[in-house]
Every structure is written in structure tokens, then in C-alpha cells.
Amino acid sequence: MAFTISKGPVAWLTNAALQGMIGATKLLPHSARVRTVGAIMAALSGPAGYLTRAVDNLAMVWPDMPAPKRKALAKEVARNAGRTLIENYSHSSFGALARKSPLSGPGLAAMHEAIQTGRPVIFLTGHFGNYEALRWALLDQGIEVGGLYRAMANVYFNAHYVRTMEDMSGPVFEQGRRGTAGFVKHLKSGGLAVLLFDIYEKHGVKLPFMGHDAPTATSAAELALKYDALLIPFFAIRQADGLTFSVELDAPLAHTNPEQMMLEATQALEARITRHPDQWFWIHRRWKSHRNRGRAPELLD
């Protein structure tokens, strides 16, 4: 999660408002809390600029979709983002639900085999559903999963958001020289970790994503090749009740070359977006085209 405004009075006020909302809604039971924050985000998506960005991205990818449908879908995207935000601040209640998330797919057996042999595993996903459900579901089996995260630009919000990740399963490492070194050490010891790959990467390889080139980081594939780690795409899919998840683990990607591996990971994400378009974060400036108007803060990077 990164914010356009990094510090100063506006950033401080933004953080204060978000913390106030989080603190107030945490007084509610979990189901009411998640639905409330989702509704708030959907309602504020227009004034905050998220609605415009999501609608523009949808129009670029699916130009034949009627405008009212694009707007309605964009609101559901914001709703899912709000639910994800408050879930990640609700360790005990969200964890209790997410621990029960069913795990399925060929990647599950491959993961267990890797654990038995001490081989590292990198779980790869996008900003889809709530990606943290995997970590909770594996924790229920006694399996800790670490993660590499990108610090938020809003320094005030970043300080406490990082603590929410540290309170979950497994160690977390900030992108950068020191954090990456810790992440590599974790992998070399046979650890398991999650990486998200669907954020705009200025120096990334241009890969087709939803019909348009998107600069994509290849670091996950490079790490998998260098340290002989399994690279398993996974997707935590929010269920119809809006509160629970099922987690699909695809077969490990064949070790070929970084560009081909990330192309296959991108295709796996595309397939889930096509099936569940409201669960991917269209509010991101994934392509950074002229269509990505507005200066809305980046959510949940």
C-alpha cells in the first residue's frame, strides 16, 4: 500500500483519518466491520479518485462493456479493497476465518514435497481477493510463510501497517538492500514466502496483461531460478458471503527463463480476473497510461 502524498500535513491528516476509521470500525463484530469498511470505500471511491481510475482501466481493457456496468464494477472493486484493508487489521477475527480457507490445486502437493526436502517455495500472486488468506490457511497447518513488501510512501501510515504484517505468520522483509538480503537468507534456509508481482515496475519487462503491455518485475522468477525455489502462483478468492476465501494453488511454473515464467504467472492472474473481475484491484495504475487519470493514493500495494 503506497500513498501519493508521502509526508507533511496532508499525509498526516490522511493517516489520521484512516486510523480513525480503522479504530472505530474495529469496535464492530467482524462481519459488520468488513462490510462497513467495504461500503465506506465504495462510497468514497468517487471523491477519492479511485472510481475514475478503475473505470478508465476497465474501459481500456473491455471497451465494449457498457459504461453503467463499468461504474458498478469499479465500486465493487473499491468495496473489495476496503474489506481487504480492514481484514488485514483484524488479526484475531480475520485469522480465525482465513485459517479455515480450503486449499486446492496441484501446487498444494508440490509445496508439501518441497517442505519435506527443504526446498524453498515462492508463492506468487497479484492484488486479488485477499492474498493474506494463504498465510493464515498455512499457519493453521503449522507452516509459516514470510513475505517481501514495498514500503508505503505515507511514512505515518507505513509505521503501523508494517506491524500488522509482522503480527501475521512468518517474517516480513522490506524491499531494499537490507530487506532483500534477509529475504534471500530466508529462502536459502528452505523458507516459504509470498511475493506480489502486479504493480507497475518502471524497469520491468513489458509483458501483455489483459491485452496491453505492462512493465513487470521478473525478480520472483530470477530468485526461483537462482535458489532452485518452486514458484507457485496462487489466488485467494473471496466467496459469495464476502467474508471467507478459497485458495487455489497452481502447479509450479517450469524453470525456463524469467520472462517466460512471469508471462505464465501473468496469464494465470488474467484467468482469475476474467472469472472474478471485481476481486482484482483495478484502482492501481498498472499500465500508467493516459487513461489512469487523477492523483488518488495507491491502495494496498
Image: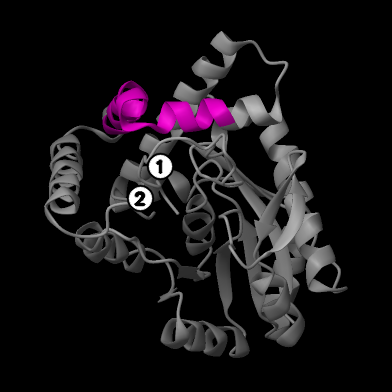
Q: CA distance from mark 2 to mark 1?
A: 6 Å
129 sits left or right of 231 in the view: left
Residue 238: in sight, yes or no? Answer: no
> In which quadrant will I find the C terminus?
bottom left
Q: Is residue 141 above or below residue 98?
A: below
**What range is drawn magenta here?**
33-56
Q: Determine the secondary structure under disc 1.
A: helix
Q: Residues within 10 Å of mark 2 (few under 14, many from 20)?
A: many
- Which residue is drawn at the image coordinates 53% and 63% (left, top)? 141
Q: How did the renderer colour the structure?
A: one colour
The foreground one among 176 and 98 is 176
Instruction: Give the percent coordinates (x, y) of residue 203.
Output: 62, 68
- Residue bearing mark 2: 88
Number of dots carrying numbers: 2
155 sits left or right of 171 in the view: left
The foreground one among 165 and 180 is 180
Residue 62: in sight, yes or no? Answer: yes
